[in-house]
Amino acid sequence: QAQLVESGGGLVQPGGSLRLSCAASGSIFSINAMVWYRRAPGKQRELVADITKGGSTNYAESVEGRFTISRDNAKNTVYLQMNSLEFEDTAVYYCNANIKTSPLVAYDFWGQGTQVTVSS
């Protein structure tokens, strides 16, 4: 089994920045795509950004230009740099990763979530 542990959430004022981290550990052969999702109060979960093993990225339109996803394959870690934060970015942010636990077997794993609150 593998585990994902997120960190870096917190309370920030509008216009501020936060950096989220998500570290994978456990039985890992390799990691394919790594993804950040979020769920705001009263809303459905939405994809924020994703990054392939090779580093190709994709962003939700609402965060394009403000958020940057990156990964360190040597550390099995994905990051989300969030700048120019807005009230609407308040949500629980979840990390997801497609992890090969052996050469032929891959599963999706989820982190526990980290709260990001944008408030003045």
Image: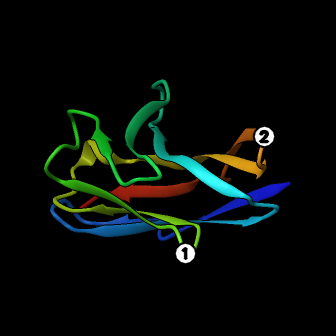
Disc 1 crowd, CA 10 A, few/some/many (<14, 14-19, 20+): few
Hey, which residue is sitting farthest right in the picture?
1
Q: Which amino acid type corresponds to the residue marked 2 in the rendered image?
A: Leu
Q: Earlier in the sequence, mark 2 or mark 1?
A: 1
Q: Which amino acid type corresponds to the residue marked 1 in the rendered image?
A: Ala
Q: Position of residue 103 (x, y in %)?
A: 77, 48
The quadrant holding residue 91 is top left
Q: Nearer the viewer, mark 2 or mark 1?
A: 2
Secondary structure of residue under mark 2: loop
Secondary structure of residue under mark 1: loop
Quadrant in the picture for the C terminus: bottom left
The residue labelled by disc 1 is: 74
Disc 2 crowd, CA 10 A, few/some/many (<14, 14-19, 20+): few
Q: Position of residue 82 (x, y in %)?
A: 28, 60
Q: Residue at x 86, y 54 (%)?
A: 1
The residue labelled by disc 2 is: 104
Q: Residue at x 73, y 58 (%)?
A: 29
What's the mark number on residue 60? none
Does residue 75 appear left or right of residue 44 in this picture? Answer: right
